[in-house]
Amino acid sequence: MSIRVRFAPSPTGQVHIGNIRTAIFNYLFARHVGGEFLLRIEDTDLERSTREAIDKLLECMDWLKLDYDGEIFYQSAQADKHRAAAAALIDSGDAYYGAADESGKRPVFFRLPLNLPDGRTVRTVGPAELALHAETPVEITPGGIHYGALSAKGKPMPTVSALAGMRDLVLRDAAGRVLFELAPVLSRVLAGESFRITGAAVAAFTRREVYYHDLVKGELAKPLDGMKDQVIVRSDGSPVFHLANVLDDIAQGVTHIIRGDDHVENTYRHLLLFEVFHAIPPQYAHLPMIVNAAGKPYSKRDGDAFVGDFRSRGFLAPALFNYLALLGWSPGDDREKLTLEEMVAAFQLDRVKSAPAQFDIRKLSNLNGLYIAEMPTDAFTALAREYAPEFAAQPAFDAVAALMQNRTKVMDQVRDWRYFFADDFSRDEKNSRKQLTRPEIRAALAAFAEKLAGLSDWTEAAVMRLLEQTEAAAGLEHGKLFQPVRLAATGVAGGAELDRTLCLIGRDAVVRRMEAALALYQGVE
């Protein structure tokens, strides 16, 4: 059977890195096994899923070279089919109408299957009992069983369970007397009758559970008594995500669903929907959540969170793809920089980790720096011009780009090259104050500036020789004047080789800046 996966976002604006990582994992899995990678736009929220939002998604996918197979599948175009399927479930007794809203319209609820035999989706666990708050009446209705579960402090916790979860329910009082049995009257309840039982202290029933093997998390299960019937069509006639999602997966022949682990709870209900539609459920793989350093879900509050943010800052598409692919997956060795072909060859779902994946901007920046370093010099220079258009025409720009390429981790750092071209650069005030107020340093800087002004051989070797001679004459250890000179001439405490930096700035500008820095910190303690 051909493997088919789908990326099914609900575009409502910017594309979060968590969503695009889901796309990357689906893409790598499909390409690894020779399957199909489908794109489904779940655009049923017509107010938020605008054309602009969809275009942003497609632009992100194109930038990352996430090429999909076939045509885009738009969920909104399937609404009539979804409503027809819901109507068929009502006819078969697998769904029912809920209470009408103010306009008289009624939602449709999916009734969790009562008689699904033990098999691939449901299994019997065994006898179970729940302690109830005896003063809270138990309501048995066609829509479920309403009761007050007993908290650790003895307080009632309003709870609703689907009929399917307690189909052989027996209610007893505190003395053990049977107050109610559901099985003999179940058909009456399904026909619309309700029952109200008071004084029930214990609910006894046979526990059954929905289960499946997750390709990342292993075996997962949820008791049916912990579930309730689900709305599948709103009162306004719009199909709900759960119904549309399952029907579209059936229509597209999806064999594997790879998505975030925030969907684990949805999967239990979806499996039951597959069963009532007589379809074989896909295999599921739920990806670990992306978290911040504190272990909380990664969001905009933690920094850049949208693909567009990273792109505008100057992260390269292959680097972001590479990093997100490794956010929760390992190729089986210690490689951190991989080509697309290497990732496709190595990708397997059993190497996806179940633990949350921590986003680390420093690791991403370092990886991006490796990709930048590998760029052809001409390509890097052309891209750098886009981030510093005000200096792009400067004669020294190409030489500065060549010097700074291996030191650039993110392209927006190009804006920090200002000191190569203009005197109005920002200054590291803390280090400048520390270095440029010391008398012995100030005297040496003044001497160096004076000697530079008369230097006719403006070469890296001549500048460095003069700097070392000035240090020696001032009785300073070798290298002690390097940082003060850099701070005076560039405003920063570190950077590329000092001799190359000074030569690119130019003699007159260097002398002018050193004199200005000495004047700026004159008398400052």
Image: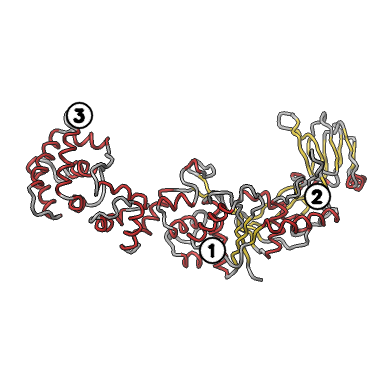
Asked whether, in this view, residue 206 is left or right of residue 453, the answer is right
Query: In which quadrant will I find the C terminus?
Result: top left
| Label 2 SS | loop
Depicted 38 relative to depicted 182: above or below? below
- In the picture of the structure, the residue carrying the numbered disc 2 is 111
Depicted 33 relative to depicted 396: above or below? below
| Label 3 SS | loop
The residue that appears at 87% across and 32% down in the rendered structure is 198
Mark 3 nearby-residue class (10 Å; few <14, some 14–19, many ≥20): few
In-front residue for pair 369/351: 369
In three-dimensional space, the C-alpha distance between marks 3 and 2, rounded to whole angstroms, equals: 79 Å
* Horizontal and vertical percent position of residue 353: 54, 54
- In the picture of the structure, the residue carrying the numbered disc 3 is 524
The residue that appears at 27% across and 39% down in the rendered structure is 427
In this view, the mark in front (3 or 1): 3
In-front residue for pair 315/159: 315
Asked whether, in this view, residue 146 is left or right of residue 311, the answer is right
* Horizontal and vertical percent position of residue 510: 17, 46
Q: What amino acid does circle 3 point to?
A: Val
Q: Quadrant of residue 252?
A: bottom right
Query: Residues at badges 3 and 1 in contact (C-beta under 8 Å)?
Result: no
